Amino acid sequence: MSVIVKGGGGSTAKELVNSTGAKLADLEKKGSGKVSVVGGLGGASPADVLSGKTFTSESGVRQTGTFKPNTFKPYPVTGITIETGDKTISLKWTDPTDEIVQGINLNEWVATELIMNENHMPANRTDGVLKYTSTTRNAHKSTAYKITGLTNDKTYYFALFPKSKEGIYNEDPSQTISGKPSGKWAVIPSLANMTPQMLNELAKDGYKSGNNWMVNAGGTAKVALTIGQTKNIKLTTGETITMVLADLNHDDLTSGGKAPFTFIMKDCLNATRSMNSSDTNSGGWKNSGMRSWCNGTFFNQFPAEWRNGIKQVNKKGYSETSSTLNTTADKLWLLAEIEAFGTNHYSAGTGEGTVYPIFTNDTSRAKKVNGSASWWWLRSPRSRSGNNFCCVRSGGSCSNDGASYSNGVAVGFC
């Protein structure tokens, strides 16, 4: 029901307003319908009506004003925003101001309750789970309230219900919002800014699609990595090496399955090295001094976070001049001839692996030592020779060299 209270001022009467000039209207009175106050109330002051005293209406009928403090519902909350993260949703809102007339507070705010429903928008304050009650006005206007432990890619529904001092709630439907946690990869850093820990998380969460490694964020597939991207690593010696993402799901992990990411040095180390101290390829890569140095001294020059992140993989290598293949478990390794060229020129066959897609021509295989083009070693022994290992010339073509010669070193790891 609506109650219209008019004063005795006739056509010249003014509407009852608060200190800011806003009309007092559409405030729901506890136990009744709508209440509107219009007119100048004749000779009675607004305080008379608000305090429950009598006055004469325009029609001359005596009526009693029954408006009392804190008998009206609060105004709705406003400015509701939502942000999603990995298993989290954060909300901000502005709590309502009070309606004060002639110094009397009609709907004093004391709290705002946050209700969450996992299936639909809450229709009222009991339609869901009470997640939080704020008793400090505008505590979350600038500082979001964060809900954790949610399920990524699932929609959650929220409603806010402000409460008055007298326990009256505003359940206006404008106070609702929904959001979907978007997953840890809502913002994907560039490879240049990724840590080994991030790469291992990507390995668990993503999948290969062509030349890209994809992850899902908020139900949307996103590109996380692309073959050919680079990452700098500063060694404990002070030297910085640039690694190129050479392929995805290419190498076999010693522990089983595929290594998601294979990296190969863009250029060689600043210092050249020999494969063995003498001109012999006996035992091939498996027994070489280079392999021992790569997985010992050189591996220990990597920062701890990289030593912890690099995975051991199985690499194939011919045994000197024969076509017998050995399998070694390595964290750092040199490329086989087949892995750089896609075929064998000087090695015993094509069984040492498959070509990495970053190698498409001689230019793509050319590497430098200290800024100058240089020959660099491959792990494949030279077929029909007990002295040489295969290598890549400074221009990127294939060749071989005596094992004691000093050439560039460019390793790969997974």
Image (cartoon, helix red, strand yellow):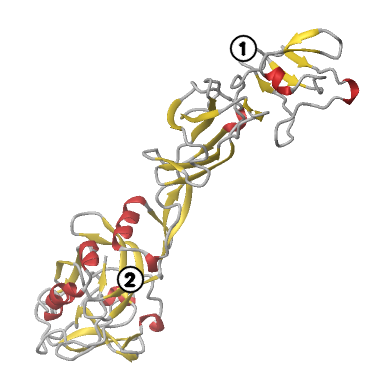
Foreground: 350 or 145?
145
Disc 2/disc 1 C-alpha distance (Å): 80 Å
Furthest residue toward top? 61
Q: Is residue 268 above or below residue 72?
A: below
Furthest residue toward front? 43
Residue at point 53% right, 36% down?
A: 178
Foreground: 205 or 30?
30
| Amino acid type, residue under disc 1 in the picture | Gly
Q: Is residue 352 above or below residue 113?
A: below
Q: Quadrant of the C terminus?
A: bottom left
Give residue 156's position: percent from left, percent from top: 48, 34
Residue at point 52% right, 28% down?
A: 120
Residue at point 71% right, 11% down?
A: 1
Secondary structure type for disc 1: loop
Q: Which mark is residue 355?
A: 2
Q: Earlier in the sequence, mark 2 or mark 1?
A: 1
Circle 1 residue: 31
**Does the image show residue 322?**
no
Q: Residues within 10 Å of mark 2 (few under 14, many from 20)?
A: many
> Quarter of the image holding residue 63?
top right
Give residue 400's position: percent from left, percent from top: 23, 87
Give residue 241's position: percent from left, percent from top: 30, 78
Q: Is residue 283 left or right of residue 52?
A: left
